Amino acid sequence: MALRSFTSPASFVKPYKQIQLNKPFFSVPFSVLKCHSHPIKTSFQLEDVIESQQFNRDLLNGIFEVAQDMEAIERNVSSPGSNMLKGYLMATLFYEPSTRTRLSFESAMKRLGGEVLTTENAREFSSAAKGETLEDTIRTVEGYSDIIVLRHFEGGAAKRAAATAKVPIINAGDGPGQHPTQALLDVYTIKRELGRLDGIKLGLVGDLANGRTVRSLAYLIAMYPDIKIYFVSPDVVKMKDDIKDYLTTSGVEWEESADLLEVASMCDVVYQTRIQKERFGERIDLYEAARGKYIVDTNVLNVMQKHAVVMHPLPRLDEITVEVDNDPRAAYFRQAKNGLYVRMALLKLLLLGW
C-alpha cells in the first residue's frame, strides 16, 4: 500500500504539543503499512534520526515511498501537500560548514510550507563560543522550534542532543561519526539509478577513516543481500575495523584493494570521497600523502560497466575530474537533488507521522 495520506486534516496536528515532556512517536499498524513485498511486522516509531543502524529494510522502503511522493510535490508547488508543514519551525544548528546539507534541509522545509531558523557557523557565532554546553543550547533552541537539524564537530553529539531534547533531532553529521540522512539519500539514489539494491557491488574510495558518509552508507547497504564492498584508500585513511567487523558479522563480503581501475571495472557503484584536510589537524604531511592518490577520471570511466554510476557526497576537490561530469554515469548531482526528496520525507514523517 502506498503511503499517500498527506492531506488528511488530522495530519496537521502537531503531535508533540499533545504529549508533554515526551517526544512524539508515530506508530503504523501492521495492517496499514506495507512497503513493496515486505510488510512491517512491528509498529514503526521514529523519534529522531541519529544513526543508520536505527533503520531496517522495511523502514527504508517506507521512507523511499514517501520520498517519491515528495518528488511529485516538489514538481507541483500548488499541490495540497506543499503546505503540509505550514506553522512548523525547523532550526538548523550547524557547528561545521555546510552547503548542500543545510540548504537542502531548509529547502525541504520551505517546500512543505514550513519556516526555518538558521545558524551557519554555531561554533563561532553562537553562545558555544562563550562556553555554553551543547545540552544547554539544545534546551534553548527547542523552545523556539519544532524540530532541530544538528551538525556538530564531535562524534556522538547527535545522541547527546537527542537525549536532551523533547523535539525531534536529525543528525546532519557529527564529526567523524555518522551522517545518516546522506546514507539514506545515497541508498535512494542507488535504487533510482540501478533499479535495485540487492546484489550490488560497491566501491568506496578515498577518505574512509574519517568519512562519516561512507560509514553510514556501509551500515545501510549491509541490510541488503548479496552485497560486496571494495575499500580503496590510501593507507593513512583506511576504513576502520569497527565497520569491517560489522560487515563481517552481518555476512557482507568486503575486500581491500589498492587498484582503483580493477575495482571500478567490477563495481555497480564507484563512491568517491574527498580526502578531508580538516580531519588531519596539524599532520599536513599525512594529508599531502593521501590526497590525489585515487582520482576518478576518463581512465576510470573507460573500464566501468555501462550501467554503473559514479557517486560522491560532495563537495569535491580534484578527486573527480570535470570531464567526468558530462558522462551519463556521473550521478553525483542527481544524488544531491535526491537529498531534497529524502529530507522532505523525513521532515514529514517526524512532524506528522505516516
Image (spheres, helix red, strand yellow):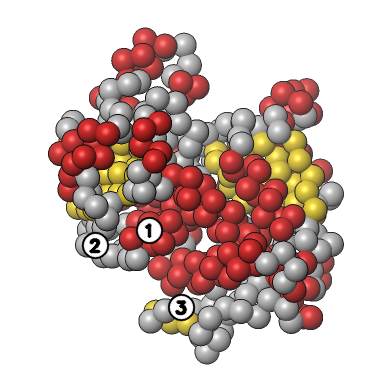
Q: Residue at x 52, y 47 (%)?
A: 336
Q: Is residue 203 visible?
A: yes
- Label number found at residue 199: 2
Rendering coords of residue 325 (x, y %): 40, 38
Residue 127 vs 54, above or below: the answer is: above
- Label number found at residue 193: 1
Residue 168 vs 243, above or below: the answer is: below
Question: Callout 2, which amino acid?
Answer: Gly
Q: Which of the pair 199/70 is nearer the observer? A: 70
Residue carrying label 3: 35
Q: Is residue 189 left or right of residue 44?
A: left
Q: Dividing the picture into quarters, in which one does residue 288 lie?
A: top left
Say whether disc 3 or disc 1 marks the residue closer to the N-terminus.
3
**Mark 1 falls on what kind of element?**
helix
Q: Residue at x 79, y 45 (%)?
A: 117
Q: Are marks 2 and 3 in contact (CB under 8 Å)?
A: no
Image quadrant for the C terminus? bottom right
Say whether disc 2 or disc 3 marks the residue closer to the N-terminus.
3
Q: Which of the pair 263/239 is nearer the observer? A: 263
Residue 277 vs 176, above or below: the answer is: above
From the viewer's perspective, is the residue at label 2 or at label 1 nearer? 1
Q: How would you rate the neighbour count of disc 2 (Cα within 10 Å): few for under 14, some for 14-19, many for 20 or more? A: few
Q: Is residue 217 left or right of residue 87?
A: left
Rendering coords of residue 33 (x, y %): 52, 82
